[in-house]
Image (spheres, rainbow, N blue to C red):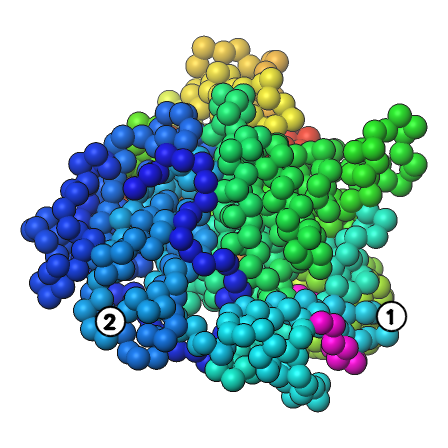
Amino acid sequence: MNIARKGPGTGARSPRARLQSSAPRQSLNGTWRFRWSRGLAVAPADAWNQPEQPDSGVPGDDWTDITVPAHWVFEGHGRPAYTNTRFPFAIDPPNPPDENPIGDYRLVFDASPQFRSGAVLRFDGIESAAEVWLNGELLGETRGSRLTHEFDVTGKLNATGNLLAVRVAQFSDASYLEDQDMWWLPGIFRDVDLVATPADGIWDAFAVTDYEAADGTGTIDLFIDVAGAAGADVRLSIPELDIDLDASSGGVIGVGEVEPWSAENPRLYTATLTAPGETVTLQLGFRRIEVKDSVLLVNGTPIQFHGVNRHEHDPERGRVMSPELMKRDLLLMKQHNVNAVRTSHYPPHPDFLTLTDELGLYVILECDLETHGFEEIGWKQNPSADPGWRSAYVDRMQRTVHRDKNHASIVMWSLGNEAGTGTDLEAMAAWTRGFDPSRLIHYEGDWSSTYVDVYSRMYASHREVRQIGEEVLVPAPFDATAAQVHRRSLPFIQCEYAHAMGNGPGGLQEYEELFDAYPRLAGGFIWEWIEHGLAVTGPDGRRGYAYGGDFGEDVHDSNFVIDGLVSADREVRPGLVALAHWYSPVRIEVLDASVRITNRYAFADLSGLRFVWSADAQSGDLKVGDVPAGQSAEVPLPDLDLPEILTVEALLASDTAWAQAGHPVGRGQRLWLNPAEAPADLHAPAPEAFDPVTLRLRSLGGLTLDGPQVGVWRAPTDNDRYPGWDERDLPPYAERWHAAGLDRARTRVVSSSWDEDALRVATRTTPAGRDFSVDADLVWRRVSATALTLDVTLTPFGAWPVEWARLGLDFVLEGAPVGLDWQGQGPGPSYPDLAAGTFWGSHSVEADGLYTPHVKPQESGARAGVREALIRTSGGALKVTVLSAEGVAVTVSPWSRDTLAATAHHHELEADGRTHLSLDVFQSGVGTATCGPGVLPRYRLTPRPGRVTLLLAAGE
Ligand code: GAL
């Protein structure tokens, strides 16, 4: 086995479309025999691949059973490893390391006569290189872990006892081309099939569909590769379009008026191609993707990608996909107003694309290519610029395009990700353009953009995105080069933006507003859809997730693999809730006497939606009428006495393939809240309730607590631990906060006075070893034996060197948290730049809903705009009513911030049995500094005074 050469695989048939066919197919998935070796040098050179002992199955006794498909690291052999950009081995292309796990696989199978006249053995995914033997004969080698290889086995099959033997190398020359940011997971991880290729059947078919918006007609440009003699009779039939004709010679076929395909209305027509020996079925979607004057058009209309990047990930099985999981991902996307997906950074399981066609998502289908690790050495030896690798590059692209070329949902072919620049990429683009001019070509890594159809970037700041949108509104500078002029003719997308790592991403609103404002900006794709946590069991049996470094890797990138809008188990993270709001096809603004409804669909009117208003205890339907795509309408408000809250929701009017009638797709709300009534007849509180040293409250009507302590720190989020890309010269906030001592503030009582009507305490809270402070004036008054009012004025003192994380009052309550009921924003958490998708109302969560279980513990769970909260603990309940005009952000946690900051995994967090409560007057935003801009200036918390009046009551 030669795994140190630069070429593509060998021996496979030329790639073709995955066709839904009448030809027999036999799955070879199941239990195989398996043997693991430490490296190629010690992989036994015995008769492992020879059918000498077909009955006992295997020679030797170091063989075990293994599941196919699976990654062998989850089947008891070796361990997973995670790196982002770095290779986990020496950069010495094309050589893999010597310590290179080798897996030998054997399967004995029978083949019925229908396969013996013509068949291929089909492998949909083997990481990273394999040698395939059938009945002792070498069929060839695979390269391209996520690419299909089919080996011709015509005339090579026996009725019974065929031995399929596959030797897989974890690392190979191909690993240099597969340095995607993900786990290294070896093995046969996608399906293996035996597929009949009938002699007078159809080997391949390519139906290039087009739609002419000017007259509403469609065409099919048909290419058919018949298996047998050329000129064999093939009929095309599309019953819905009354088409039934001889298509043997292919060519352009007009189909008359059709309904076009789009992500909004994924209209498909079933077509069959019938040859004497085989019928294949195609689902045709008629659509045109094109660029005009730097604007991206689908069916003649500008569209925006509201996209996400999706890796394939299952917390137990890695990149082994089930139909249920793929469907779940896509339903969740559609339910959160996502209309596009980039298959980062390789072709997905082939069935995924059948679903994107049916459900309606635009797809950027990416080739299995990334050479990011060469950046570490200044891109020296980058394969992309080495002609020796060219045939491997072009082969990868051909396998990518051929397999999926008939899917309506694919609007762009992407050459790969982060593979630097070079002529091999240009060769991929040239082949693709020649083969399939009906789709656009994407590649982000070469900003010259000379051989692509779209200008693509990742994590560009808001400022730069605006500049890119604006620059094409004026003529090109006179000294612009030809390449620059070409680039200006291209639409712009962010193939990755808003890094959904930990608590975040912030800044979505500002991106969306830019995408809306400039026609050149065709939207983008959030990084990323799924966190790649691997399921583990915590010390007390709790389910948790592992990340890089948890498997003893010496080179790894820690939790950078945990950066999704959904957890590995597909729990929705707060970032997805916010995203659903900004990606919504409808904007609803409640004005003084009317509601403005904006239709953000590209094609659809609003007849698929029902608008429902609710105000206090009343509700009703809002008649919105006809609002064409891209237009707004103002609808009068129902005749109501001035309510405190008015909410208008857009709901699906009827069931769709992805959600039921009533599913919310957009919401608008306006508040006219009256301040809570302040209690009268107040006196000084009883001294026993206060700690004699700190003068903090220690008991309230039978409740034991300690507070408030002034707090300006938070347990750093992932984003707090990285400098924003726009300010890399500064250390990240987590470090600046630690240097300034926000995490070690001490409070001194400056003065106190006890008189008839109040206890007045002045404190100064200063980080240990520093001389800048927050001064607090606290005024306590007794309402009853179980209730007090607290009026707090907070004032910064001295020269704070850094912005704060928050400004608030911290309490510790005896007893573990049990739940929270509140009136405020909810039901999920919100931070100033991550607040969309929450709405004002009465909400309630139990203990496990108080926080977001981020895999790496960090600040989470703040409920903003709270006017009233009941904090339920095992030691009793505390009721907080905000008497001042603005609400507070309430964070309730079973863990202190120190514990959160010091613990590596959520499942390792140890609760102290108390309730940690913060009432914050201000909060900083969260930003997306892990990749992209940090907290935008408007959401930063420069030290400033704050004031709040609270009613605290031991409560029911
Ligand atoms: C990008 C890359 C992604 C991922 C992301 C960080 O540079 O394309 O694969 O690594 O950064 O999570």
Magenta highlight on residue 375: no
**Whether residue 911 is situated above or below residue 226 in the rendered picture:** above
Residue visible at 81% across and 61% down in the picture? 301
Distance Cα–Cα, label 1 vs label 2: 57 Å
The residue type indicated by label 2 comes to Asn
Look at mark 1 in the image and give the residue it sits on: 214
Q: Is residue 255 magenta?
A: yes
Determine whether, in the image, residue 606 is placed left or right of residue 867.
right
Q: Residue at x 33, y 74 (%)?
A: 116
Question: Which region is colored magenta?
Answer: 251-266
Give the label, 1 or 2, closer to the camera: 2
- Report if the CB atoms under discs 1 and 2 are less than 8 Å apart: no
Relative placement, left or right, of 475 versus 736 is right
> According to the image, label 2 marks what residue?
158
Q: Does the Cβ of the disc 2 residue fall within 8 Å of ligand 1?
A: no
Location of the C terminus (image quadrant): bottom left
Q: Residues within 10 Å of mark 2 (few under 14, many from 20)?
A: some
Identity of the amino acid at label 1?
Answer: Ala
Residue depicted at x 73% and y 38%: 450
Say whether residue 77 is left or right of residue 620. Answer: left
**Front position in the image: 511 or 648:** 511
